[in-house]
Amino acid sequence: MDFGGLRAVDRLDLEIHCGEIVALIGPNGAGKTTFFNCITGIYTPTAGDIRIHPPGRETKRINGLKPNRVTELGLARTFQNIRLFHQMTVLENVMIGRHCRLRSGIPGAVFRPPHTVKEERQAVMDSYRILEKIGLERFVNDLAKNLPYGAQRRLEIARALATEPFLLLLDEPAAGMNPHETHELDQLILRLRETENVSILLIEHDMKLVMSLSDRIYVMDYGRKIAEGTPRQIKNDPAVIKAYLGEEYVA
Amino acid sequence: MASLIEIRKSFLVSIWFMFLTFPIMVIRVNTVENVIQWRWNNMIAVGLGSFLLSFVWRYLIRRKEQGVQRQEESTGLRRSIFQRIGEDRRIFLPGLTVAAVAVVVFPFLVSMYQVNIMTTAFMYIMLGLGLNIVVGVAGLLDLGYVAFYAVGAYTYALLNYHFGLSFWICLPIGAGLGAVFGILLGFPVLRLRGDYLAIVTLGFGEIIRLVLENWNEFSFGPSGIANIPRPGLFGVAFSLEAHSRYIYFIVVILAIFTIFMVNRLQNSRIGRAWLALREDEIACQAMGVDKTRTKLTAFALGATWAGLAGVVFAAKTTFINPASFTLWESINILCIVVLGGMGSITGVVLGALVLVLLPEYLRAFAEYRILTFGVVLVLMMVFRPGGIVSNVRRTYQFEGPDSGDK
């Protein structure tokens, strides 16, 4: 991915298998979020391929697709700096996630035929179920902006889940959380993998979380992949320690 | 109470005002006798007036601040008086009946002049609600809205002139063409937001007006099109007075139709997508909402109502020329939306009534009319910055896992 003369992400090969939790780590400015933006269609990569193989469907190359198409195909993301719809209620936020799975158009909105009414009711119910799973059901009618910080982060995950993804991309889900909230998040992510049948790619700086959750870890620095492997391998990788852990995590 | 500090503050304000208005209120040069007249009593009047007004002003400000504090203290959802009225059926239903009866009886009780003013007000309700979709709900600041109004008006005028098509046939055509032009405007501005969008739409509005003004063969230029027939009713002949009543009722029905439609659109999957688009475009798209399509439907559906209102306008005035579709008109409609309360249907209806009726009934103040109007607008924005009906968007109220209604 190039921005003018700047190469922000340089030949990063990354694979995620079905049901895996993969972490992408690296110092600030390494290009992790840019990588996310490339995958989810916010940027069009200048070179390279992104291929997805949704369960039970054909392999598909998704370079340059619009973000909403990417989401329809089953990739859903959260944002590093929370991007909720603040003036909408928690339920409505999740219902926006359902949007791409609903079909009613303008005639449906105006005439409200039975199937539209049914679809809307179903959307409300589905959204509520998702909130229950994430544990936000007591906030259901609150405006998103009035939620405590940790709950806002979880609402982003709920909203992403509502799009029925097979791969969930979490951009620093634990940023700014206290240890208790982080622990809850840890449990939540593990539970989601079990019950929702999603694979997860997460960017995170909280090493404790990363090491305990991930099946595999990729490490980036200056747009390049410098290491990959299991948490144990990464911990002992000299390149990683030099680039990253060596400076911040002197044991 | 009025402590010494308060008096001192007001005193300073009055001194300041006396100083500011000194050149225009006190000095007058008599050019005939070449002398300067010093009108000192004007200065005293200004001083006393500003002294008293500053007291009132600060009292109101203080009350407003207390109001804000009270709201912050009270827990739970904030409700405005309008929402409570809307929810309480005991007040709402009789209130609606009274309003309906008043609307129906109104044209038979008052003069034709009054009926015409009311017709205009209802037309602006349609325009306001249309623009409300674009600006209030979808958050796309459109300063060229009047272009679609012009499209509607010229659709009727030209189709009637060339092909003799009647009002009722032109009504849907005008609405449709409005929507088409909405999409035409929508395409180039898809990537724009905020200020940039405002400027481009402003340009678009001016282009339409200038084309109409200069393309003589097509639109008869600045001289406009006259003798546009009023709407007919199976060939019944109307007196002028009966006709204005007839148009009044057409507009009332169209306005109610608009309210109904806009309400349904807002509370639907599309309405939700518009809201989300206003809140955060990137997140909205990342959650699977097709940004292009959502924006275009907002522009198209907003413009539809302007097209409709335009046809009615042409039929009502029987004469149109480009001077009716200036930027000022767009700003006026935008004022209705902002003053009424962005995104609120009740708000826009009230805003339209206030903004159309107030200048008319302020005619009693003669030359101070626009000044008074301006003062009212400024006061409104200071004391109710969210509009007449602020923050009352109806949200899905989830009642429990077994009763998923709204």
Image (tube, coloured by chain):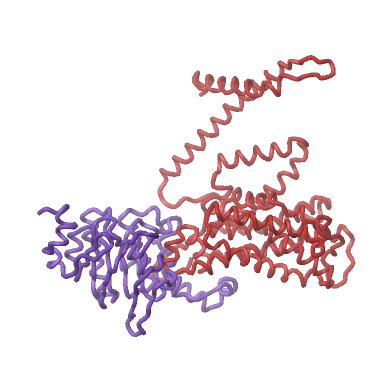
- Residue at (51%, 24%) from the top-left corner? B1
Give residue B264's position: percent from left, percent from top.
58, 67
Tell which of A154 and A216 is nearer to you.
Answer: A216
**Furthest-left residue in view?**
A251
The quadrant holding residue A137 is bottom left
- Residue at (78%, 70%) from the top-left corner? B168
Q: Which chain is purple?
A: A
The quadrant holding residue B213 is bottom right
The quadrant holding residue B298 is bottom right
| Residue B162 visible, this angle | yes
| Residue B403 visible, this angle | no
In the picture, measured across the screen, residue B326 lies left or right of residue B225, that is: left
Relative vertical location of residue B162 with respect to residue B138 in this rendering, above or below: below
Give residue B385's position: percent from left, percent from top.
54, 44
Relative vertical location of residue A123 with respect to residue A209 in this rendering, above or below: below
**Furthest-front residue in view?**
A5
In the picture, measured across the screen, residue B168 lies left or right of residue A245, that is: right
Give residue B353's position: percent from left, percent from top.
68, 50
Colour applied to chain B: red
Give residue A74's position: percent from left, percent from top.
37, 75
Relative vertical location of residue A118 with respect to residue B246 in this rendering, above or below: below
- Residue at (71%, 15%) from the top-left corner? B40
Count of marks placed on residues = 0
